[in-house]
Amino acid sequence: MRMRPTLSWTPAEDLPPGTTDLEPVVDALSTGGVLVLSGAGISTESGIPDYRGEGGSLSRHTPMTYQDFTASAQARRRYWARSHLGWRTFGRARPNTGHRAVAAFGRHGLLSGTITQNVDGLHDAAGSEGVVELHGSLARVVCLSCGAFTPRGELARRLAQANAGYEPVAAGINPDGDADLTDEQVGDFRVVSCTACDGVLKPDVVFFGEAVPPPRVEHCRELVREATSLLVLGSSLTVMSGLRFVRQAAQAGKPVLIVNRDPTRGDPHAHTRVALPLGAALATVAGRLGIAVHDEAAATRDGA
């Protein structure tokens, strides 16, 4: 069953404003067994914009839907032209303090798991283990006919060869890896097909209007059942794919803590919502727990 895309919601007027008190988050992590659910807001400090925050991409960009992608060759041309250009920036993004803090919490045994709604792979890059990529990953491509998977880098090389000299200037980058291009800039961009069966290629991500695979959903539900509390980081929880786990935790009597500067659709179920920038907030939490937040990539480059 496909989900109907939900792009916006109206916050309840009678909810209390967010707090700046991080002690509930510190207390939850001190207890251990915390399940993290992250959204686009944790990656904004890595240069990837979110959908709905201040300056969010939905103000200028309508994400591709599964129905449009599968029904229209022109829609696929537009998507791959934008995504091919966007990948050059998206693929160079590096983990920020928020990602590294989550990885550090995991290394110290404070987390029961991490679920991310993001498709950028930055939790893995920061050193988190066993991350459930709820909406898939832009680093993989799947054939809709034969089901073969290929690395995104391989497709990028093929698209570059098929579109030599294609260098439009994008107006911006979006959380789904799309670059903002006009139809004129898309032009006659050439889309390549599966090398195994000549089928249609799609990024291995869940588009708006597409359902998260049921086994993945059930795995996440099991993680919620096993957790002592749920910590939501940088998600507006607008879409049901993430909100359902907040509702599940709340119904089971597990504390739900949200760190997000703006109100979220999950606030009615939350024990607390901390309205602070994520990187600074998580660094502060780590400091109070006596946990160092290291830049593992930088340490490797420096030979540490």
Image (cartoon, rainbow, N blue to C red):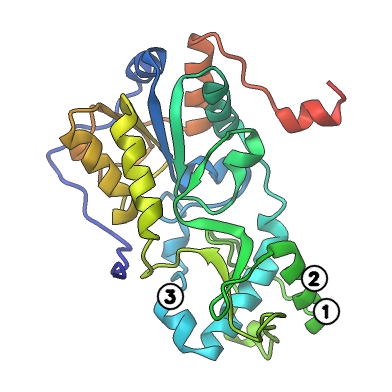
x 74%, y 63%: residue: 153
In the image, residue 137 above or below residue 71: above
Question: Horizontally, is 53 left or right of 162 in the view?
Answer: left
Secondary structure type for disc 2: helix
Badge 2 is on which residue? 157
Question: Horizontally, is 30 left or right of 140 in the view?
Answer: left
Disc 3 to disc 2, C-alpha distance: 24 Å
Res 294 label: none
Between residue 34 and residue 40, name the one nearer to us.
34
- Residue 279 in the image: x percent, y percent? 53, 30
Badge 1 is on which residue? 161
- Residue 200 in the image: x percent, y percent? 58, 82
Kind of residue indicated by mark 1? Gln
Q: Look at the numbered discs 1 and 2 and tell me whether their residues touch, using CB distance below 8 Å.
A: yes
In the image, residue 12 above or below residue 26: below
Badge 3 is on which residue? 66
Which image quadrant: the C terminus? Answer: top right
Q: Residues within 10 Å of mark 1 (few under 14, many from 20)?
A: few
Which image quadrant: the N terminus? Answer: bottom left
Q: Look at the numbered discs 1 and 3 and tell me whether their residues touch, using CB distance below 8 Å.
A: no
Disc 1 to disc 3, C-alpha distance: 27 Å
Question: Horizontally, is 304 left or right of 240 in the view?
Answer: right
x 25%, y 26%: residue: 255
Secondary structure type for disc 1: helix
Kind of residue indicated by mark 2? Arg
- Residue 190 in the image: x percent, y percent? 70, 87
Q: Residues within 10 Å of mark 3 (few under 14, many from 20)?
A: some
Kind of residue indicated by mark 3? Tyr
Look at the image and tell me whether residue 236 can be seen: no
